[in-house]
Image (cartoon, rainbow, N blue to C red):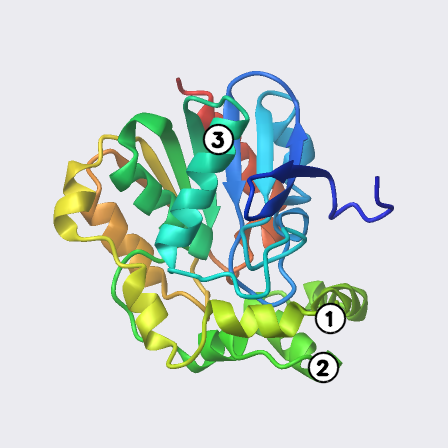
């Protein structure tokens, strides 16, 4: 076992080795992180895993191309198909027939695509600052995907993510920066979302027809002051998904689960326990 809390269990899927957290017992819920530089499942969900695992089996994998999941240097990323395939194989390997999902940003887009392509495997869905609708890539999102390792760049990214700038501490910046300095990280990161960036936002769009056909119960959460994914994306999803409910946080940016930890956890737990 590593001394780092970001490294937990390793699952061999043949072409990739998936680092994942697995805590608690009961009905499974899978947490899918976003796509920022230095991101890991633990960095995204460290405030949610302990609470949710008191009631559910909580699984949080590092998506391939991110975190401590290992892949060959020439691994080919076929955008959402890559991660849909990873999650379904991850579930199969752990004998998980069906799970609820909580998706942050890019992880929200992935959760929606999973529900469209594998409806019998996906239960309730929580979307947080999710993509899934058309929008123009902002300069802020371009900075996230175009990150080049430096403490200054990482501090700028943290400032973009959080409305409450007190969260963007030097300690957090150093942790995230150090994660991006691991051998091979930058080369891999640049292969996941190479420019032009708009095509990757477009690739996450779920059609109106597919959204209308979703039978899943969906909780949509967004920070009103999000500078990465416009709040209008969640508003559009809310209008198009029939079994949807939505909660907006004021004075909150893209990091809802960090800036509004207690409220976020309470909302998610209540929603998941409605079954």
Q: Is residue 150 above or below residue 220?
A: below
Residue 6 image position (x, y, % from top left): 73, 48
Distance from Cα at disc 3 to Cα at disc 2: 36 Å
Q: Residue at x 87, y 46 (%)?
A: 3
Distance from Cα at disc 1 to Cα at disc 3: 31 Å
Q: Which mark is residue 91?
A: 3
N-terminal of the pair, mark 2 or mark 1, is 2
Classify 10 Å Cα crowding around label 2: few (below 14), some (14-19), many (20 and above): some
In the rendered view, does 2 fall on the left or right side of 213?
Answer: right
Q: Quadrant of the N terminus?
A: top right
**Dot 2 and dot 1 residues touching (CB under 8 Å):** yes
Residue 101 image position (x, y, % from top left): 44, 36
Q: Which mark is residue 177?
A: 1
Observer-nearest residue: 168 or 56? 56
Q: Nearer the viewer, mark 1 or mark 3?
A: 3
Reading the image, the residue beneath label 2 is: 150
Classify 10 Å Cα crowding around label 1: few (below 14), some (14-19), many (20 and above): many
């Amino acid at each position: 076992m590593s001394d780092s809390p970001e490294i937990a269990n390793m699952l061999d899927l043949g072409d990739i080795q998936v680092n994942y957290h697995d805590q608690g017992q009961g009905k499974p819920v899978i947490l899918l992180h976003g796509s920022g530089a230095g991101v890991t499942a633990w960095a995204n969900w460290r405030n949610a895993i302990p609470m949710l695992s008191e009631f559910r089996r909580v699984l949080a994998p590092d998506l391939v191309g991110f975190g401590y999941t290992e892949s060959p240097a020439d691994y080919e990323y076929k955008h959402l198909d890559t991660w849909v395939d990873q999650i379904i194989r991850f579930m199969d390997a752990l004998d998980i027939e069906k799970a609820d999902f909580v998706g942050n940003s890019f992880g929200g887009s992935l959760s929606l695509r999973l529900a469209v392509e594998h409806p019998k495997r996906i239960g309730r869905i929580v979307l947080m600052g999710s993509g899934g609708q058309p929008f123009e890539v902002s300069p802020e999102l371009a900075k996230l995907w175009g990150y080049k390792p430096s403490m200054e760049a990482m501090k700028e990214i943290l400032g973009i993510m959080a409305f409450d700038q007190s969260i963007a501490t030097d300690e957090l910046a150093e942790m995230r920066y150090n994660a991006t300095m691991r051998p091979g990280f930058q080369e891999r990161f640049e292969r996941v979302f190479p420019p032009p960036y708009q095509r990757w936002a477009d690739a996450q769009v779920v059609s109106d027809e597919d959204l209308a056909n979703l039978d899943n119960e969906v909780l949509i959460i967004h920070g009103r002051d999000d500078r990465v994914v416009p709040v209008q994306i969640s508003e559009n999803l809310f209008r198009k998904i029939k079994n949807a409910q939505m909660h907006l946080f004021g004075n909150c940016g893209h990091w809802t689960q960090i800036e509004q930890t207690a409220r976020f956890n309470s909302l998610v737990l209540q929603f998941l326990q409605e079954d």
